[in-house]
Image: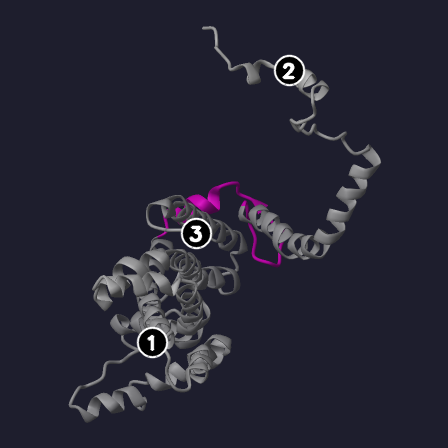
Amino acid sequence: MKLHLPPAARRSPAKDQAGSGARQAVPEAGPRPPRRGRWRHAATVAVFLLPSLVPLTLYTLIPMVGSFWTSLHEWDLITDMRWVGLGNYADLLGDADTRAAFLHTLYFIAGYLPLVYLGGLGLAVLLDRRMPARALLRGVYFLPVITSWVVVALMWKWLLNPASGIVNWALGLVGVHGPGWWTDPGWAMPSIILASAWKDLGFVMIILLAGLQAIPREYQEAAMVDGATAWRRFRHITLPLLSPSTFFVVVISLINGFQVFDQVKIMTGGGPGGATQVVVSQIYDLTFRYGRAGAASALSWLLFALVLLVTVVQIRGQRRWVTYG
């Protein structure tokens, strides 16, 4: 098909440049820098990246490669390694204790994630309002985040002590017999979820509070002029515009949930009766109690694959509910 171009478009750039000079010539790509300049630029970039690449290589990449190599062997940390190939992975996939550890980890996440998000969102909305001592309250709620897990776990273990804890004492004042929080298999995991959510509320609050303050006030004011109630403004304006912060909180909280260990080790030690044995504590026991470093490394890689899969699914699914801009 022959295109009927206008006369101006049919003129060649050479003719335009040779003409009256009213039309500006199209800038052409400049010459490529010499090879020596490119090498100098690459060396400059490498120098700036070196402080990050060195620790990343020493403390992350090399241990990961070593862990995968160990997962292909049977090793008790003392004698020589014995090659077993994928035998450790096959044993773990058919092991009932490993399946129970994964189920307990998912149980923890199912209770921890809604609790920490809704609690953090409530605090963020509350502290986004003008109120006395607002800065002080933000600092108080963030204080547990910077507190050691050892301190937090011991504190909650004392609070939830079935015999002398202050929680059961307070329940007794209203005629309720408190449960054996970390001694009853049915209440041990909820105890850990409660302590974990309490510690991480401040972190979630800060992230969501920053997201709330980034929402332009004009949207809320326009909706108020149109007669929208507070709930409709929150549902149709605040929550959609807060979705990037929510997405970040969900991803980070899920990764933290899969890696839960400190509070389990200190509060229950995986008990009672293995009711709180999660994947990371299973890795610890395989290595230091049973001397199966190869199986522990294989379980670490199975956990890594699960976290990677969940994260990729979240990133691909964010387009359906996360609103940017």
Q: Are marks 1 and 2 in contact (CB under 8 Å)?
A: no
Mark 1 or mark 2: which is in front? 2
* Side (left or right) of 141 relative to 272: right
Q: Position of residue 133 (x, y in %)?
A: 42, 86
Report how far apart the C-alphas of labels 3 and 2 lie in the structure.
Answer: 58 Å
Q: Are marks 3 and 1 in contact (CB under 8 Å)?
A: no
Q: Which amino acid, by three-letter code, is at mark 1?
A: Leu
Magenta span: 72-95
Q: Is residue 25 placed above or below 225 in the rendered structure?
A: above
Mark 3 or mark 2: which is in front? 2
- Do we see residue 272 in this rendering? no
Q: Which amino acid, by three-letter code, is at mark 2?
A: Ser
Question: Does dot 2 land on a helix, a strand or a loop?
Answer: loop
Q: Which amino acid, by three-letter code, is at mark 3?
A: Val
Please state which of residues 168 and 277 is positioned toward the viewer in this rendering: 168
Residue tagged 1: 126
Residue that appears at 49% across and 49% down: 301
Question: Does dot 3 land on a helix, a strand or a loop?
Answer: helix
Q: Position of residue 62 (x, y in %)?
A: 64, 51
Residue tagged 2: 12
Question: Does dot 1 land on a helix, a strand or a loop?
Answer: helix
Q: Is residue 241 placed above or below 174 in the rendered structure?
A: above
Residue that appears at 30% across and 59% down: 237
* Crowd around label 2: few <14 · some 14–19 · many ≥20 (10 Å): few
Residue 179 belongs to magenta span: no
Residue that appears at 22% across and 88% down: 171
Q: Position of residue 102 (x, y in %)?
A: 36, 56
Please state which of residues 153 and 147 is positioned toward the viewer in this rendering: 147
